[in-house]
């Protein structure tokens, strides 16, 4: 397996850990079992300088290496601009094939943003213009809309997005090679929209701290160069792109509708009954991902499932440990158990995806082994996230397989 997480951030992005630097990232990539990391924040001058001094070219075009981890040049930008009578706020992930071409792009956008202010700069330019600028700087470069359902900053976002991909990118739509599902949606939710069919779905962590790397990721058969990746995405090659690793979408912090400060979490049906008004503060509710998907859906996802790149729902190992032992996920106790586990059995993804049940029970405590087994069987319950609050997951030993669907919908 060759596991890739294309979308992360550096210490130069707002609300990120100071440990989001190259040495820590490469260490945690090894802990997780990630083969390829996006650099993130490629537009930030200080981060760009650090990358240029440390990552080295490989024999695969567009792939760099540091501390035995492969890197690909990526960054996220925040496009805010008026279009068709509304202010649009769209996050996009940029992919570049070389440092020289990424630097050329950075110079071209310098007049639109203060690049030193944030690793994810605000650009007051249309998303379709962004695509043109990427192509002008790098003929091989491409754009992937980020976390496409997030209410506030995304392609389909309820508050500032579009109802169609073509409306957003217009004549540049063919230079958009994929769509990022985001933590609050999974592939089956996206398969409900026929307009998504020609785009490959990718899943990434959007990590703001090293421990969050690969909470969502992409699993390929083997390594690739930059243009091979483009071809895989263009053709949705199921032999080379094996599956995506997904959160249970209910864990995402925008899955349901609600108001965080009022502690109100509503299903789409409840939101409609309340006329989109919060029952506590009487202000407009924040419409979540599931509601938005239902609104734009035009078919049943089962009609196309066999044609699509598969996926697997996972819960990060530290969250499993925290639940099993009833401890905070960031506690020293949980981090110690996590370290001991990967030292004994190998990287996290090897444990969760490749180790047999027998090997897991032979080498781990019965409680932890059972927790991993339940997650693999889908025996979890998730209180859905809403309006910026992550969902809360429980591993359930007394309920049938696929309880999330049975419990929540």
Image (cartoon, rainbow, N blue to C red):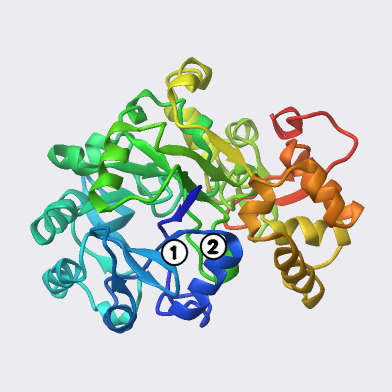
Vertical relation: 52 (above or below) 71: below
Q: Are marks 2 and 1 in contact (CB under 8 Å)?
A: yes
Q: Position of residue 91 (x, y in %)?
A: 34, 56
Foreground pick, 355 / 397: 355
Residue 347 position by quadrant: bottom right
What is the number of the mark on residue 8? 1
Outermost residue, front side: 59
Residue name at image x 69 percent, y 52 percent: 351
Where is residue 336? Give x, y as percent: 77, 74
Compute the Cα span from label 2 to label 1.
Answer: 7 Å
- Nearest the eye: 188 or 148: 188
- Crowdedness near tag 1: few (<14), some (14–19) or many (≥20) residues, C-alpha within 10 Å: many
In the image, taking residue 183 as reference, residue 372 lies left or right, namely right
Quadrant location of residue 212?
bottom right
Q: Identify the residue shown where x is 58% and y is 53%.
A: 387
Query: Residue 98, position in %: x, y?
Result: 20, 65
């Amino acid at each position: 397996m060759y596991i890739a997480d294309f979308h992360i951030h550096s210490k130069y992005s707002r609300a990120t850990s100071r440990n989001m630097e190259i040495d820590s990232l490469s260490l945690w990539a090894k802990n997780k079992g990630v083969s390829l990391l996006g650099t993130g924040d490629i537009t930030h001058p200080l981060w760009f300088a650090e990358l240029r001094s440390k990552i080295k070219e490989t024999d695969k075009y567009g792939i760099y290496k540091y501390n035995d981890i492969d890197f690909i040049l990526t960054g996220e930008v925040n496009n805010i601009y008026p279009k068709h009578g509304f202010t649009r706020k769209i996050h996009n992930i940029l992919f570049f094939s070389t440092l020289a071409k990424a630097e050329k792009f950075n110079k071209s956008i310098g007049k639109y943003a203060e690049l030193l202010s944030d690793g994810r700069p605000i650009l007051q330019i249309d998303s379709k213009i962004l695509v043109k600028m990427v192509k002008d700087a790098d003929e091989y470069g491409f754009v992937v809309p980020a976390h496409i359902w997030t209410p506030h900053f995304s392609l389909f976002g309820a508050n500032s997005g579009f109802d169609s991909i073509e409306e957003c990118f217009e004549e540049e739509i063919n230079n958009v090679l994929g769509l990022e599902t985001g933590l609050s949606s999974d592939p089956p939710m996206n398969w409900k929209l026929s307009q998504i069919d020609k785009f490959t779905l990718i899943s990434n962590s959007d990590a703001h701290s090293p421990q969050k790397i690969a909470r969502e990721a992409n699993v390929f058969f083997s390594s690739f160069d930059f243009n091979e990746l483009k071809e895989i995405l263009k053709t949705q090659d199921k032999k080379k792109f094996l599956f995506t690793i997904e959160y249970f979408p209910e864990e995402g912090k925008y899955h349901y509708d609600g108001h965080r400060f009022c502690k109100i979490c509503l299903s789409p049906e409840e939101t409609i009954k309340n006329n989109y008004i919060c029952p506590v503060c009487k202000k407009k509710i924040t419409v979540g991902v599931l509601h938005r998907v239902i609104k734009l859906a035009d078919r049943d996802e089962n009609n196309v499932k066999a044609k699509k790149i598969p996926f697997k729902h996972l819960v990060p190992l530290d969250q499993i440990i925290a639940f099993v032992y009833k401890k905070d996920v960031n506690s020293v106790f949980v981090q110690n158990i996590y370290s001991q586990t990967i030292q004994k059995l190998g990287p996290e993804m090897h444990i969760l995806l490749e180790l047999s049940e027998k090997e897991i029970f032979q080498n781990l405590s019965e409680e932890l082994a059972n927790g991993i087994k339940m997650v693999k069987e889908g025996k979890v319950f998730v209180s859905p996230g809403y309006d910026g609050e992550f969902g809360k997951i429980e591993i359930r030993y007394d309920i049938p397989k696929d309880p999330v669907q049975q419990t929540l919908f």
